[in-house]
Image: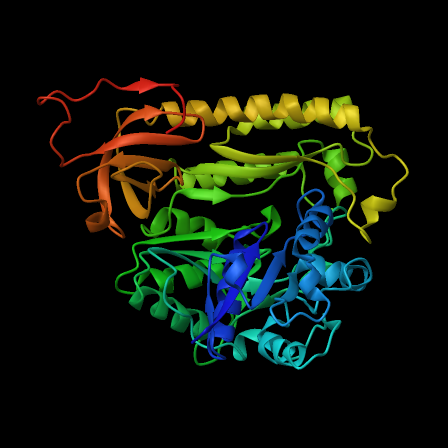
Amino acid sequence: MAKRLFIKSYGCQMNVYDAGRMADVMAVHGYARTDCADEARVTVLNTCHIREKAAEKLFSDLGRLRRPARNGGENAPIVVVAGCVAQAEGAEIMRRAPWVDVVVGPQTYHRLPELVRRAEAGERGLLDIDFPLESKFDRLPEEGAGQGPAAFLTIQEGCDKFCSFCVVPYTRGAEHSRPAAAVLVEARRLIERGAREITLLGQNVNAYHGEAPGGGAEWGLGRLIRALADLPGLARIRYTTSHPRDMGGDLIAAHGEVPALMPCLHLPVQSGSDRVLAAMGRRHTAADYVDLVARLRAARPDLALSSDFIVGHPGEDETDFEATMALVRTVGFAQAYSFKYSPRPGTPASAAEDQVGDAAKADRLARLQDLLNAQQREFNRLTVGRTVPVLFDRRGRKPRQLAGRTPAMQAVHVTCEDPDSLMGEIRDVVVTEAYANSLRGELADAPPPFAGARRAPRAGRAAA
């Protein structure tokens, strides 16, 4: 009987991908993944250090895992902390939570089976947060089944930008791109297992510069996307997360020339103030960003843009914040993520003397989110009455409800007689209602729900 492995992932899509690869490497050693923590022999907390209070959330979860059985009980689970908090604060984790058996960084989780074997043999406090010379991707087994119609594929890790607020260069290391041939091999396997859409992942994914198949000049992301688009069975391609300085001409052109590349781009700007952008080390101006957006929309006029914003970075004043609000009004976003600045240990901004007070940060965040949420609601509202192709990739919460995504990454819910028959299909949907974070629609080729009369489009009711 297989032993059970439970993985809880925090944060970004790359952590979701990493969780799947940890499950793959453990499956080779007899572990089956479970969604029930209570039946797990090994529990992995796969952490993210980007969001506010990441370490506190980890230690809260670790506190719940501390059981009397940890003191030598035979049924005690092996507790593993993985990911970016593990990399940044491994020694602190061991000090504050001595019942943790293994701490493993994001570059060494291919060693997890050996670390677990040692923990099963009685070793405690195992710490592996090196940056090994060998690529972990060369040491991982083939991907297991179960990723569904929409799959993630990591093509690049690390970052060389060293923004003042960010821990990624310290937790994920320098930029490293996988060879294009290896990416294509993994993409084909994902397609064979049912993927219709692949999202290419990287901390700075548009800096991709992978070794070309058969040698020769390195491929950039635009060239890689064009090769992926030629793979039979792959209908949709996305990528995240990007940096404005790495948005080259070939990649911009791909948005207009590759139908499989979805018209949706996450392009973090962080601030609309040139003074704050300089303090952040972003190495672009607000005007640079606006000009870049104009070039992208010239290539793909229906491009839906999302972004990241940080308010209250050290030194930000009200004038700087108003510049951010002005940029948001100028660009217009379909979706965005916004956060109060919070210090990350070891980053330059954490040591700055001109920290912004919590009250000012909270006030600015509320005003920014009001504007961003209004733009998102309006973007969704404009979809009502349109027919859009939706990739159905999961069941909804209600009976006979199916959920999927539009090309612009909007969540869509429909109700149909046989949801399972549409899983993994791309079908035209008439959007009938819009909410803050989702849409409701009807299959374009389905009979109307009430005596041949389609419901009138509405907007703004409670979320589906």
Residue at 48%, 60% in the rendered image:
221
**Is residue 64 shown to the viewer in this render?**
yes
> Front-most of 299 and 433?
433
In the displayed image of the protein, which residue is found farthest to the left? 451
Image vertical order of residue 420 relative to residue 397, above or below? below
Q: Is residue 328 above or below residue 394?
A: above
Image quarter of residue 174: bottom right
Camera-nearest residue between 312 and 242: 312
**Which quadrant of the view contains residue 396?**
top left
Q: Nearer the viewer, residue 350 or 447?
A: 447
Instruction: Pick whichever, 125 or 144, lies toward us.
Output: 125
Instruction: Say whether residue 464 is left or right of residue 205.
Output: left
Q: Position of residue 202 (x, y in %)?
A: 55, 58
Q: Residue at x 82, y 54 (%)?
A: 346
Tell me residue 395's x, y (percent).
Answer: 32, 45
Q: Quadrant of the N terminus?
A: bottom left
Q: How is the image coloured?
A: rainbow
Residue occupying the far right of the picture = 353
Image quadrant of residue 159?
A: bottom right
Q: Position of residue 57 (x, y in %)?
A: 68, 47
Is 409 above or below relative to 357? below
Say if residue 212 shows up in the picture: no
Q: Seen in the image, is 172 located left or right of residue 313?
A: left
**Residue 298 screen position, x and y as percent:** 42, 38
- Callout count: 0
Left or right relative to 158: residue 348: right
- Establish if 369 lies above or below 148: above
Q: Residue at x 67, y 27 (%)?
A: 365
Look at the image and tell me in which quarter the C terminus lies. Answer: top left
